[in-house]
Amino acid sequence: MSTEISLLCHAAPPIRSSAHLGRRSFPSVFGSPPLLPPGFRSSCFPPRRLLATMAHPMPLESSVVHDFGAAALTSATALGLLRFWEELAKRGIFEQKLNRKLVHVSIGLVFLLLWPLFSSGSQAPLLAALAPGINIIRMLLLGSGIWKNDAMVKSISRHGDYRELLKGPLYYACTITFATLLFWRTSPIGIAAICNLCAGDGVADIVGRRFGRKKLFYNHNKSFAGSVAMALAGFLASVGYMHYYHTFGFIEESWGMIIRFFVVSLASALVESLPISSEVDDNLTVPVTSLLVGGLVF
């Protein structure tokens, strides 16, 4: 077994972040020299066998057919999850605000879980973006009143007003679509944006409503507990997906990456806590902050 692992380690090139793969990236504020002593990364993150994935090269025609199938499965999963939360909202299992945040947390994170289903073809991110892209159209139709679906409106709006879907829910769908098309699987920036939007912002509201008695001195609409919960949830989700994608060979796993994810989550939580959050929707400020700060540190 040790011989086999040794051969794999010498045969496979090191996995790098998108900034080292020739993709466009912003200058890193962390630069050289390395953040950690030589050998520290390898001792804490030993080489492991990469999991089998659909990202291995395949003929173009086969990869296109395969990705259409993966897109259909992804869309069906997202639709099924939405229907599940709609049914719970209809039955009144959870209060409306909690149900809405559970939708907020789960949809994007489940979508990220399915990215490894797609091939390495150039068409993969385009087809993967179909699911959130369809959701953009759904939000536009529901928010404009063209399509009526009271259960869905109740499950994803704050006050049950269909016009709310043209704000937060629409920004949410646009963020996930944008991150899929532009960053895809090999960039930590997209992972950070989606995780801070879904896990971070979603958990912040849930925790803040229940334990947020102590308000922030600079914004009495936000709580200390909610802001801490947002930073931790966004950070832990980001690190979890870093490890998940690393097992497929998509992204680097290191302490340096963990520190960068923490910086992005901390910045997102700080911006979300500012008074401007009362004027501008969190579903817009959180991903924009994650993208900008992520572009600087990764």
Image (cartoon, rainbow, N blue to C red):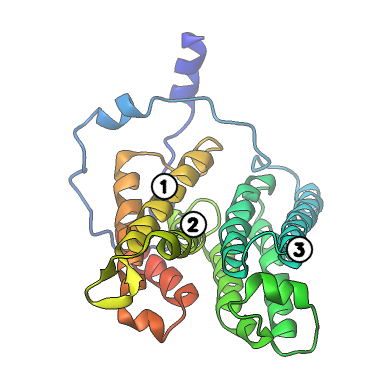
> Can residue 105 be seen from the camera position used here?
yes
Instruction: Please tell me whether mark 3 sits on a helix, a strand or a loop.
Output: helix
- CA distance for labels 2 and 1: 9 Å
Disc 1 crowd, CA 10 A, few/some/many (<14, 14-19, 20+): many
The label shown at residue 203 is none
Question: Which numbered disc, 2 or 3, marks the residue that appears first in the sequence?
Answer: 3
Instruction: Kindly identify the amino acid type of the residue bearing the numbered disc 3.
Output: Arg
- CA distance for labels 1 and 3: 32 Å
Q: Which residue is label 3 attached to?
A: 91
In the rendered structure, the answer to whether residue 178 lies left or right of residue 221 reads: right
Rendered position, 185 above or below 149: above
Q: Residue 40, how many percent across, how many down?
A: 25, 29
Rendered position, 176 above or below 187: below
Q: Which residue is label 2 attached to?
A: 199
Whether tag 2 and tag 1 are in contact, CB under 8 A, the answer is yes
Residue 184, quarter of the rendered image: bottom right
Disc 3 crowd, CA 10 A, few/some/many (<14, 14-19, 20+): few
Instruction: Kindly identify the amino acid type of the residue bearing the numbered disc 2.
Output: Ala
- Residue drawn at x 44%, y 65% as measured from the top left: 209
Question: Which numbered disc, 1 or 3, marks the residue that appears first in the sequence?
Answer: 3
